[in-house]
Image (cartoon, rainbow, N blue to C red):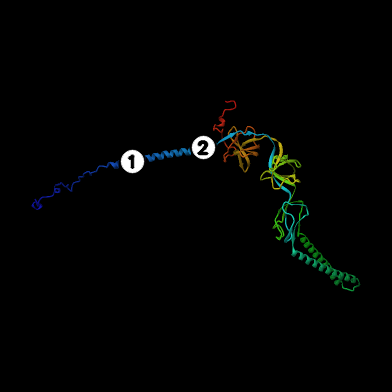
Amino acid sequence: MSNESKPNQKPPEAHKQVPHEGHDTQHAPVQRPIAPRFAITGIIIVLLVFAALATFGILSRIHHDDVLAKTTRESAPPVVIALPPKKGDPIDTFLLPGNVTAYTDAPIYARTSGYLTKWYYDIGSHVKQGALLAEIATPELDQQLRQAEADLGTAQANAKNAHSQAQRYQDLAPSNAVSQQDTETFTNQATATASAVKSAQANVDRLKELVSFEKVYAPFDGVVTARSIDIGQLIDTGAAKELFHMQALNTLRVYTNVPQLYTTNLKRGSRIDITFPEYPGRNFQGTLVRTANAIDPASRTLLVEIDVDNRKGELLPGSLAQVHFKTPAMETFIIPVSAIIFRREGTQVGTVGNDGIAHLIPVTIGEDDGATVQIVTGLKEGDRVIQDPPDSLIEGEKVSPQSPSGQNQDEQPGPGGK
């Protein structure tokens, strides 16, 4: 049946009850159930938050514990290894390096300018004092000398004429044949020309001296150790260029610096043994001739000179020597090189007493083989030396001495085993 056949029929919704507008009747909203997957996600988020808070708390506690442990370690006495030094053999000699120099050492320079025409000695040549080493040609200087000699002749002629006139006027003055003024004029003129002669003569002498420097002579007996010129080379006056270098080698000087500790044992005129690496097993005798008579404040050493006879020509200047000094027998100790402390106060070692207090002791070093070092003064028997002292170690600092095995030395059993 079609809809047109039932015009008065209402839709089903029309039969529902509609609340009256005048009543306050409320109905609970309809809630849909929560999906299970959203509930699980929320629980996981809550668990993660609690886990993060717990982890942060644990890490904070661990950090605070580390800071506390670090602070405790820093405030605690540093742990050091302290051992008694090994006793060394007593020494009655000590060895120092020495620099060997010629007794006389002189560079030879030109006193006149010109061109070198001849040289007569090369390196290694033994020459006597006054031997001709080289000749320099100076044509300009020769001409200046001739001119000066001519000027001297003119000055002498003028002086002679002035002297004659002055003498003539002086002879006529008593008879009033000439005036007193003219007499004084010619007398003063004679004096002035005499002074001009002396000046011209001095100039001639000066040029003659310069001409004499055309020939270069040896200033002392020695050996030519360097030649820096050749024929035809331009030579300038002064120290701009060295012509030759000479050294006197019959006697050599050996210089060395003696530590302040040993200076009281040095006596002028004493015989000193000197060795050279090129002559193994052989001793050369030297004589201590002089000292600087002053301690060098930078190194606390005394500079001494020892002369060695070298008339045989066996030794060479510039070489390195080993100087053997004698000293009263001294007790020595051997410690590792790592125990040495080098500071501006000088060479020191750290020691620790039974009370655990560190002390910095100034010491004097003897022989050094690279691994161990010989201590000549500063240590005594019974001292305990800190083997590898920290850089921050200071005098009077409290330390914790231990043996190499790590056991505290204050807890080690004594000699009686108790």
Tell me the quadrant of the picture where the C terminus can be found.
Answer: top right
Q: Give the image location of residue 346, x and y in percent.
A: 63, 42
State the predominant SS element of the stretch in magenta.
helix
Q: Secondary structure at mark 2?
A: helix
User: Relative to the observer, which residue lies in front, 155 or 414?
Assistant: 155
Can residue 146 be seen in the rendering of this structure?
yes
Residue at 71% x, 37% y is: 327
**The one of 91 and 278 positioned closer to us in this rendering:** 278
| Residue occupied by mark 1 | 44
Q: Quadrant of residue 288?
A: top right
Coordinates of residue 336 in the picture (x, y in percent): 60, 37
Please state the horizontal and vertical placement of residue 12, each as a whole percent of the image. Answer: 14, 48
Q: Is residue 370 magenta?
A: no
Instruction: Say whether residue 21 is left or right of residue 373.
Output: left
The quadrant holding residue 82 is top right
Which of the two discs, 1 and 2, labels the residue nearer the N terminus? 1
7 relative position to 384: left or right = left
Is 393 positioned to the left or the right of 281 in the image? left
Residue 377 in view, yes or no: no
Question: Furthest residue to the right?
Answer: 175
Tell me where residue 214 sits by quadrant: bottom right
The amino acid beneath tag 2 is: Arg
User: Circle 2 is placed at which residue position?
Assistant: 73
Rendered view: 43 above or below 159: above
Q: Which residues are magenta?
A: 45-49
Q: Where residue 35 is drawn, which disc sits there?
A: none
Nearer to us in this view, 274 or 294: 274
State the image coordinates of residue 405 (x, y, percent, origin top left): 55, 32
Q: Secondary structure at mark 1?
A: helix
**Crowding near pointer 2: few (<14 within 10 Å), some, many (20+)?**
few
Residue type marked 1? Ile
